[in-house]
Amino acid sequence: MTVYLNKPAVISALGRGLMAHIEGILSPEPTLTPRSDLVHGKTLFFGEVCGSLREFAEHISSQHRSRNNQLLWDALAQIEPQIELLKQKFSADRIAVIMGTSVSGADENLPLFQQLANHQCIENTKFLQQTQLHSDPADFVKQAYDLQGVAYGVSTACTSGARALMSAARLLRLGLCDAVICGGVDTLSPLTINGFYALEVLSGSHANPFSRHRDGINIGEAAAAFIATREPLEGESLPLLGYGASSDAYHMSSPHPDGVGAAAAFQAALNFAKLSSKSIGWINLHGTGTVHNDRMESRAVAQIFGSQTPSTSTKPLTGHTLGAAGALEAALLWGVVSRECNPSGKLPPQVWDGERDEQLPEIYLTDTNSYWQNQRIGASASFAFGGNNAVLIIGESNAGLG
């Protein structure tokens, strides 16, 4: 059985809509925003969504009104007509929702926590329990569109969005639903940002993945949502050819230095898709720009694909969007594969200083002259705390099928 992904909805520092994102990664320009209000005494760069967000509809429950959900609500406007068609095609109890997030709406409780820290009276300040649940983005979508199917959240740190798509595929394969609204969302959060600062992995400038000068990540925010079905919907749909996951259980926050788990996830996805490594024409790398990630990821890519598969990290343009990253980068892969969105077949050039780290295995990082060769089949890699690894493979409608 084939699972199809309809054209995704997406919002990030690159803008709104898939075409804005594809144009942004194919002809990259600076997108990150300097801010000095998120880490005390520091001015750092972030992948911030600029401009106002779509106002919530009147029927949206107050318990779901977080900025995190508003970011998702803004993105969902792009596929709202398709959602309404789904409701006509299938009954409401046959449409599921699975959303990945890492922080959800926990920041909505910051005023309460600040009052507690200042030993102030909190009698008139509510604790927003539902808003901070990791299931809240999925619960919100279910309530917003009056759906009655399965709905739950996935929170596996930076693989959350990718694993939401994998979970959607499993629900469809099991026959538990006929369509799934799936993806990921995370908003800029002082809690998360300062946590990464404490780990000493935030870049002092712009992320520079795989460079010998790399010094860490830029945090970003985004929402990306797909409709997954067992048959193509009206408009362009692309098959989710394969997916694979693994868990290193090596360290609380660091990946296995040899990329053992990452390589296992790549291989599992290839095995699922019944494809060889030579079938992959582009890899959207996790590529955070940290010393540890880029070391292990380059080893995993070199082990499975060698040094001839074009590969790119898109995070210098969006920031690392954490729980949304797996879905956002799957959406970017979808758009780069699509002949409608990318008729020229160009691949996104790697944004970096070009100074290769000689201590890393050589992998093929794209440049402005990189294009698809033959079939358009690509992989998107996401790696998370605890060695939680996920890889998705998306290709053209005739790729790898039959």
Image (cartoon, rainbow, N blue to C red):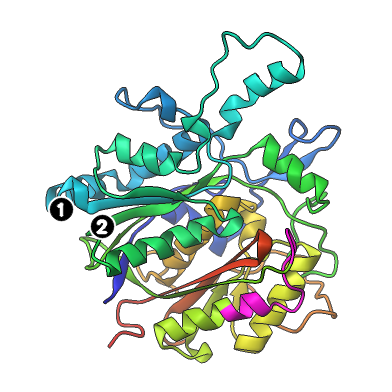
Looking at the image, do the residues carrying marks 2 and 1 touch, with CB atoms under 8 Å apart? Answer: yes
The percent position of residue 284, horizontal first and vertical second, equals 56, 70
Could you say where residue 262 lies in the image, as x and y percent from the top left? 63, 75
* Residue type beneath disc 2: Ala
Q: Nearer the viewer, residue 311 or 325?
A: 325
- Crowding at dot 2, Cα within 10 Å, few <14 / some 14-19 / many 20+, comes out as many
Residue identified by numbered label 2: 179
Residue 266 coordinates in the image, percent (x, y): 55, 79
Residue 365, horizontal then vertical, whole percent: 67, 76
Residue 274 left/right relative to 325 = left
Q: Main secondary structure of the magenta part?
A: loop
Question: Residue beneath label 1, please?
Answer: 90
- Is residue 301 located in the magenta-colored stretch of the structure? no
- Using the image as rendered, state which of residue 42 and residue 170 is in the foreground: 170
The stretch of residues the image draws in magenta is 251-264
Query: Can residue 9 be seen in this snapshot?
Result: no
Which quarter of the picture shows residue 112? Answer: top right
Q: Could you tell me which quadrant the C terminus lies in?
A: bottom left
Query: In the figure, residue 350 lies in which quadrant?
Result: bottom right
- The N terminus sits in image quarter: bottom left
Q: Is residue 155 visible?
A: yes
Instruction: Give the Cα distance between marks 2 and 1.
Output: 8 Å
The image shows residue 297, relative to residue 132, as above or below, that is: below
Q: Amino acid at mark 1?
A: Phe
Q: How many marks?
A: 2
Residue 183 horizontal side relative to residue 397, left or right:
right
Q: Secondary structure at mark 2?
A: strand
